[in-house]
Amino acid sequence: MSEAVGTNKGGLLLGLLIGGAVGAITSLLLAPKAGSELREDLSNTYRTFNDKTSQLASAVGQKTQDIASTVSDKTQDIASAVSEKTQEVASAVSEKTKDMAGSVSHQATEAADKVTESKQLVAESLQAAKTNYQNNQH
């Protein structure tokens, strides 16, 4: 057993040395950059981000203008169509009103003529009845 423990001690020591070396190399490769290099990288990243944001804002602004223009055009088209339809309806109503007024006027004239005829018939009938009554009284 003592031999096994000795072998394990050597393996453990070898593992610690290899692990330490790998850790040291990894920490050197992944270590932060120098301050000036880091500032330059951050500045470049900021510029790239700023440029992309400006491009995105410009694209959104252009799309907004396009949509506003389209909405304005469509609104004008709808308003024009509504105005035309309103004028058509007003014209149709005006024609129907004139037709109805003419018809009512014609009917009123006919009614007045019939009233005049009826008045004459009543007057004649009364005159005939009066004459007939006076003839019967004598």
Image (tube, grey):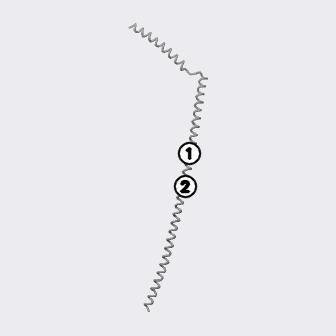
Q: Select label 1 or label 2 by which is in front.
A: 2
Toward the bottom, the furthest residue is 138
- Tell me what residue is drawn at x 58 percent, y 40 percent: 62
Looking at the image, is mark 1 or mark 2 earlier in the sequence? 1
Q: Which mark is residue 84?
A: 2
Q: Is residue 60 above or below residue 120?
A: above
Q: Camera-side residue: 9 or 116?
A: 116
Q: Is residue 104 above or below residue 49?
A: below
Q: Which mark is residue 52?
A: none
Mark 1 closeness class: few <14, some 14–19, many ≥20 residues within 10 Å:
few
Helix, strand or loop under label 1: helix
Q: Is residue 6 left or right of residue 67?
A: left
Q: CA distance from mark 1 to mark 2?
A: 21 Å
- Tell me what residue is drawn at x 58 percent, y 35 percent: 55
- Quarter of the picture containing the C terminus is bottom left
What kind of residue is marked 1? Answer: Thr
Q: Report x, y in % for residue 136.
A: 43, 90
Q: Camera-side residue: 101 or 59?
A: 101
Mark 2 closeness class: few <14, some 14–19, many ≥20 residues within 10 Å:
few
Q: Report x, y in % for residue 83.
A: 55, 55
- Tell me what residue is drawn at x 59 percent, y 25 percent: 41
Q: Which mark is residue 70?
A: 1
Q: Report x, y in % for residue 85.
A: 53, 55
Q: Is residue 1 left or right of residue 123?
A: left
Q: Residue 10 sits in which quadrant?
A: top left
